[in-house]
Image (spheres, rainbow, N blue to C red):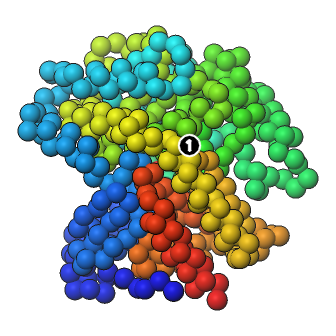
């Protein structure tokens, strides 16, 4: 069984933890009580010298690995030249070059434009503003179990009341939710194909009962639901939604904030579905930890808001753009997309092996290296095993592995390791995970 490396027991971490509890409110929560000293590749070290295999990657930020030398060098060199002039005051080449590169690599062979923001939520906010301005229609449809951020609008588009929305209403007007497939929990006797048909048919009812298509400017969809529990829709469903959008002059926004930059085994999640979104939001692994997000879209749509209508003081900062350009180089040079496919294969094989051993694992699913296990008390009733999921996450970090939970019922273990992770590190992490199942089910 893996050895306990519980950092909280050591004096340095304990003291820092006490200071944290005193100085910082509890709402910006911590999954672990690991106080970081440094991070490299797929490994994190705490202030007590403990080592952790990182299967969380800062929640999907570190596709190219922590502190990739090329990214560090780009940031250091940029910091020595200029940290901030504000793009709106005095622009710089890295912003433009990064926009050019994203216009090139995102799905869709039409002319595109890109603008930058700081966070994922901000990218979603801006995509919606652009869609409203272009269509002249305020309504936005998101999906059950979707996650788009914590600002007022993005929280309104997000599902899961606790913890994200509870007590924070009223929510933004003209936001609506539609069902998104969840094949593991589909109604009994409904095969996936009929289930897709049924969900797509809900749009027709929605346009009669809730809002007319001439009031809906955009549909926003995650290619694979992230916080919702790594739920992969079918090509038929995604293409069906896109078709409905086209029929009614509704823009299709792909939220690729968690799925982007190789995570799903292709550069973008939408590549799996052969759908080119009108607008696409990116963040997380875009700049390997420097705060940066982007909206890329059809040039005519992106150009609808007038000069000065969009932006932000720090949006597309020189340091973040420099980091991101380095990330894009690394993705190409180190064949990160291919690596994701390999990581995904190994994780899925290990998870299926665990599923054969532990009744607790009801479902194993994923796309590329976006892999998850859904835990249930009983495979027949599928009662969510949220408490055991939390126990496993805790066991993991106390034994040297970062793991994350997700899902509407908080019963999904999801994994977002850096894609450069070595086979040895991957196996080490999987063996800690196996010990966690052994401990929780004994
Ligand atoms: C799909 C998706 N959209 C939006 C967001 C919000 O990003 P941020 O936390 O940077 O605001 C997230 C964050 O997890 C996400 O996964």
Relative height, residue 272 to residue 348 (above, below): above
Quarter where residue 19 is shown:
bottom left
In what quadrant of the picture does the C terminus appear? bottom right
Q: Classify 10 Å Cα crowding around label 1: few (below 14), some (14-19), many (20 and above).
A: many
Residue sitting at the far right: 189
**Residue 212 point in image, percent of width and height:** 69, 23
**Residue 311 point in image, percent of width and height:** 29, 26
Quarter where residue 294 is shown:
top left
Relative height, residue 89 to residue 261 (above, below): above
Relative height, residue 332 to residue 368 (above, below): above
**Can residue 162 be seen from the camera position used here?**
no
**Residue 307 point in image, percent of width and height:** 30, 13
Q: Is residue 375 left or right of residue 85?
A: right
| Residue in front for this viewpoint, 164 or 410 | 410
Relative height, residue 325 to residue 228 (above, below): above
Query: In the image, what residue occupies the spot 43% across and 79% down?
Result: 399
| Residue in front for this viewpoint, 205 or 312 | 312
| Residue in front for this viewpoint, 333 or 408 | 333
Classify mark 1 as within 8 Å of ligand 1 or not, answering yes or no: no
Q: Is residue 133 left or right of residue 66?
A: right
Ligand 1, image quadrant it occupies: top left
Quarter where residue 425 is shown:
bottom left
């Amino acid at each position: 069984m893996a050895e306990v490396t519980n950092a909280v027991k050591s004096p340095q971490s304990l003291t820092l933890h006490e200071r944290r509890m005193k100085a910082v409110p509890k709402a910006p929560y911590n999954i672990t009580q690991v106080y970081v000293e440094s991070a490299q590749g797929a490994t994190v070290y705490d202030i007590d010298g403990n080592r952790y295999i990182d299967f969380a990657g800062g929640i999907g930020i570190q596709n190219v690995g922590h502190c990739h030398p090329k990214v560090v060098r780009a940031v250091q060199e940029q910091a020595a030249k200029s940290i901030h002039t504000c793009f709106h005051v005095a622009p710089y080449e890295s912003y433009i070059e990064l926009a050019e590169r994203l216009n090139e690599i995102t799905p869709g062979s039409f002319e595109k434009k890109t603008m930058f923001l700081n966070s994922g939520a901000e990218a979603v906010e801006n995509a919606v503003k652009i869609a409203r301005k272009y269509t002249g229609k305020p309504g936005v449809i998101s999906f059950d179990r979707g996650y788009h951020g914590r600002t007022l609008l993005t929280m309104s588009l997000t599902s899961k009341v606790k913890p994200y929305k509870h007590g924070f209403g009223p929510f933004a007007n003209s936001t609506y939710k539609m069902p998104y497939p969840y094949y593991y929990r589909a109604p009994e006797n409904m095969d996936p194909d009929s289930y897709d048909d049924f969900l797509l048919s809900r749009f027709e009812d929605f346009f009669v009962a809730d809002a007319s298509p001439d009031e809906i400017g955009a549909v926003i969809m995650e290619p694979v639901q992230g916080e919702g529990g790594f739920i992969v829709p079918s090509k038929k469903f995604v293409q069906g939604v896109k078709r409905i959008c086209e029929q009614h002059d509704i823009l299709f926004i792909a939220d690729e904030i968690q799925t982007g930059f190789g995570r799903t085994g292709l550069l973008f999640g939408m590549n799996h579905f052969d759908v080119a979104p009108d607008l696409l939001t990116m963040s997380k692994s875009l700049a390997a930890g420097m705060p940066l997000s982007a909206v890329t879209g059809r040039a005519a749509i992106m150009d609808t808001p007038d000069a000065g209508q969009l932006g932000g003081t720090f949006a597309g900062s020189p340091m973040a753009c420099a980091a991101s350009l380095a990330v894009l180089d690394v993705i190409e040079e180190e064949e990160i997309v291919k690596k994701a496919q390999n990581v995904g294969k190994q994780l899925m094989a290990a998870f299926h092996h665990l599923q054969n051993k532990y009744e607790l694992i009801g479902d194993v699913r994923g796309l590329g290296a976006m892999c998850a296990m859904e835990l249930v008390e009983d495979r027949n009733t599928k009662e969510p095993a949220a408490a055991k999921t939390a126990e496993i996450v805790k066991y993991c970090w106390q034994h040297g592995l970062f793991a994350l939970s997700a899902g509407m019922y908080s019963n999904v273990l999801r994994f977002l390791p850096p894609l450069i992770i070595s086979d040895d590190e991957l196996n080490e992490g999987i063996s800690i995970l196996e010990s966690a199942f052994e401990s929780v089910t004994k």
